Image: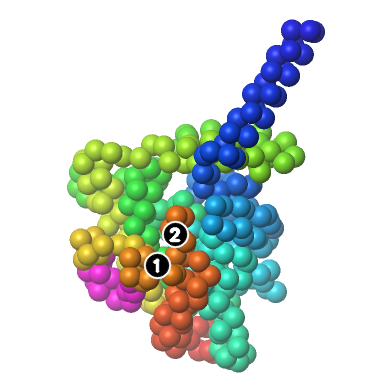
């Protein structure tokens, strides 16, 4: 009993010392509970009816989801026949408080235009996901939501996310092949459950550092790995945009941080399927719209994106009036 007690006390001292050292010397990207949970189809999805505070070096934000598991206000009815926003952390609004993310800003401006212009807005953005999430979401959820327009937020890190997630691969004939969920995702969720079972542990800087190190592992470093990431990504984009074109749904493709080398093929795919492409202001040209270290948009950045997207969204809605308007 004495030995066990000494061991437990020693462990507690070591953990507390590690926490002090990390808080003092090591910058941790974010501290707070995890927004997402394991999903057998997508790998991860945002928790439903969830709210927490996240702290980073440059900001503190309030992040909440509704009962459908999307960031945004609780809908009065199922939000079918509206605008669907799909993307990663830029779309979900990492770095800004509830209501400051650009899908919410667009929803508010459409509401202010009058009841006839008001349409449901669904923010299905989920951080640290690639374009395989887009395709699976459309295949499983399109018939439920029947969107009048879809805004895809394509970030340059989607190339890496697609390679790490491996939801899809491309065979020797260039065909897209669906795979299962990576085992590392399931293992991470097991650790998450243990952490969240201990009150306050999710706000530990030591835990935040461990989560940061794990999330950045498994990145392809070889040229062949990067080449395959590009092949899979372009094939996913081709398939997703073909999906919307076949159903006559206007698609807006927002490119975030994409250079001209990769932007060329993406623009070509958008033209091929009749999608409208918009290049987000770069951090180099407009640093005032971004956090300096974190790299996400700040509140001013989300306002700028909302202003740029709003006229395109209005045009898309006029091209696809929806079932109610047609009746």
Q: Residue at x 64, y 47 (%)?
A: 33
According to the picture, the residue beneath numbered tag 1 turns out to be 287
255 left or right of 15 in image: left
Which numbered circle lies on residue 292? Answer: 2
Secondary structure at numbered mark 1: helix
Residue 239 shows in this picture: no
- The image position of residue 195, as x and y in percent, is 66, 36
Task: Give how far apart the Cα atoms at labels 2 and 1 are.
Answer: 7 Å
Q: Is residue 244 magenta?
A: no
- In what quadrant of the picture does the N terminus appear? top right
Residue 255, quarter of picture:
bottom left
Which segment did they paint magenta? 266-279
Q: Are marks 2 and 1 in contact (CB under 8 Å)?
A: yes
Which numbered circle lies on residue 321? Answer: none
- The image position of residue 198, as x and y in percent, is 72, 36
Q: Can you say whether 216 is above or below 153 in the image?
A: above
């Amino acid at each position: 009993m004495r030995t066990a007690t000494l061991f437990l006390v020693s462990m507690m001292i070591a953990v507390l010392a590690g926490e002090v050292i990390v808080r003092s010397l090591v910058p941790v990207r974010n501290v707070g509970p995890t927004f997402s949970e394991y999903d057998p189809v997508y790998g991860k999805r945002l928790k439903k009816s969830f709210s927490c505070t996240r702290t980073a070096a440059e900001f503190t934000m309030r992040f909440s989801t509704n009962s459908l598991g999307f960031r945004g206000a609780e809908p009065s009815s199922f939000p079918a026949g509206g605008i669907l926003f799909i993307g990663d952390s830029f779309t979900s609004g990492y770095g800004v408080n509830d209501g400051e993310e650009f899908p919410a800003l667009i929803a508010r401006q459409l509401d202010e235009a009058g009841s006839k212009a008001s349409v449901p807005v669904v923010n299905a953005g989920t951080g640290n996901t690639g374009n395989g999430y887009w395709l699976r979401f459309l295949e499983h959820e399109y018939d439920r939501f029947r969107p009048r327009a879809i805004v895809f937020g394509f970030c340059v890190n989607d190339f890496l996310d697609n390679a790490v997630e491996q939801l899809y691969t491309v065979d020797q004939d260039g065909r897209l092949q669906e795979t299962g969920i990576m085992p590392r995702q399931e293992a991470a969720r097991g650790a998450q459950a243990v952490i969240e079972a201990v009150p306050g542990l999710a706000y530990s800087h030591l835990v935040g550092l461990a989560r940061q190190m794990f999330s950045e592992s498994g990145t392809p470093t070889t040229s062949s790995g990067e080449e395959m990431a590009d092949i899979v990504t372009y094939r996913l984009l081709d398939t997703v945009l073909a999906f919307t074109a076949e159903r006559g749904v206007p698609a807006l493709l927002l490119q975030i941080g994409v250079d001209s080398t990769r932007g060329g093929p993406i623009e070509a795919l958008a033209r091929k399927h009749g999608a409208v492409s918009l290049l987000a202001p770069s951090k180099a040209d407009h640093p005032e719209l971004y956090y300096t270290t974190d790299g996400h948009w700040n509140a001013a950045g989300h306002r700028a994106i909302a202003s740029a997207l709003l006229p395109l969204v209005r045009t898309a809605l006029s091209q696809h009036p929806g079932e109610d308007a047609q009746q």
